[in-house]
Image: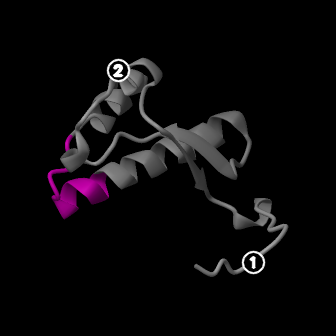
Amino acid sequence: MKDIFGTFAMMQLDENDEIREQKGAMYDLFIEQLEKNTGMKYKVFQIRIPPPKRCHTYSKLHLLLGDPLCYVVRDESCISLEKIEEIKR
């Protein structure tokens, strides 16, 4: 399943809504299966997200470190706000 998921994750979206929905459904299925197999509910996932297609200017640093990290939060109760302030310019 890992190989299939990896191949699917590398598909280009090409702004196609149908492919985007199928890809999203595949991610959801993967998470669902992971939770079923482990018996745990996951609140947050750390994933790597490639830059948008129009921003394919890779620096040596990007090639060394890889794609940026992103946190996908499925349960917002795990986020606590310590302070909210308005910044005036």
Q: Residue 62, how many percent across, how many down? A: 39, 27
- The amino acid pointed to by label 1 is Glu
Asked if 19 appears above or below 38 in the picture, the reply is: below
> Which quadrant, please, contains the C terminus?
bottom right
Above or below 49: residue 67 = above
Q: Residues within 10 Å of mark 2 (few under 14, many from 20)?
A: few
**What residue lies at 38% left-to-right and 54% top-to-bottom?**
25
CA distance separating discs 2 and 1: 37 Å
Question: Depth check: 19 or 32 in front?
Answer: 19
Residue 30 in the image: x percent, y percent?
48, 41
Q: Which residue is mark 1?
A: 85
34 to the left or right of 5: right
Q: Nearer the viewer, residue 49 or 1?
A: 49
The residue located at (75%, 78%) in the rendering is 85
Residue at 69% over, 62% down: 75
The local secondary structure at tag 1 comes to loop
Would you say residue 64 sits in the magenta stretch?
no
88 left or right, relative to 12 = right
* Residue displayed at 66% across by 49% down: 44
Q: Which residues are magenta?
A: 12-22
Q: Which mark is residue 22?
A: none
Badge number at residue 60? 2
* Closer-to-camera residue (1/66): 66
